[in-house]
Amino acid sequence: MNDLDAQIRAALQAEDAEILAEFEGGVPLHEEMLQLYQGRRRWLNLGAMIGTMGLLGGLLFCGYQFFQVEPLEAGSTRQWIAWATGFLALFIWLVLMKLWFWLELVKNSVTREVKRLELQVALLNKSRQAE
């Protein structure tokens, strides 16, 4: 804890410290994931999650079909390449969707910290005005 944090905490009253205590602990990951499906963008996040499940299904299907190609048939190399290309394309899309979800989690975390800082500044300003 640096000096600024110590000064802020010294300026806070008992009830203000209780409010800040709620923000001290981090939010568990499973609660952060559930918060993605609340708020204004819940339909977009829900649609993206359904799309991600669809991508996973397609990925598994392409992987299964890749191993079902008979190696001695005519054109089997072409089929292997087609199923492997489908698998890799879907894998890249799946990774991009997961990255998008992690970026949403980071955005929500940063927003939560900014709100916490706004609360601390407001409480500090209120305590200085009372003096």
Image: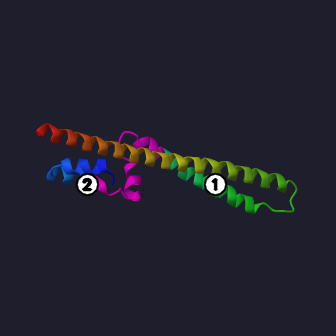
- Residue shown at the point (30%, 55%) measured from the top left: 24
The N terminus - image quarter: bottom left
Q: Name the residue that disc number 1 marks.
A: 59
Provide the major secondary structure of the magenta segment: helix
Foreground pick, 60 / 103: 103
Q: Residues within 10 Å of mark 2 (few under 14, many from 20)?
A: few
In percent of width and height, residue 80 lies at: 78, 55
The way the protein has been coloured in the rendering is rainbow
The C terminus - image quarter: top left
Q: In the picture provided, is 37 more to the left or to the right than 86?
A: left
Foreground pick, 59 / 4: 4
In percent of width and height, residue 108 lies at: 40, 45
What stretch of residues is rendered in magenta? Answer: 23-47
Q: Which picture quadrant has residue 77?
A: bottom right
- Residue shown at the point (69%, 58%) measured from the top left: 63
Foreground pick, 10 / 66: 10
Foreground pick, 79 / 94: 94
Q: CA distance from mark 2 to mark 1?
A: 42 Å
Q: Earlier in the sequence, mark 2 or mark 1?
A: 2
Q: Residues within 10 Å of mark 1 (few under 14, many from 20)?
A: many
In percent of width and height, residue 31 lies at: 37, 56
In percent of width and height, residue 100 lies at: 52, 45
> As drawn, which residue projects farthest toward the front?
3
Q: Which picture quadrant has residue 126?
A: top left
Foreground: disc 2 or disc 1? 2
Q: Name the residue that disc number 2 marks.
A: 22
> As drawn, which residue projects farthest toward the top?
129
- Residue shown at the point (64%, 54%) measured from the top left: 59
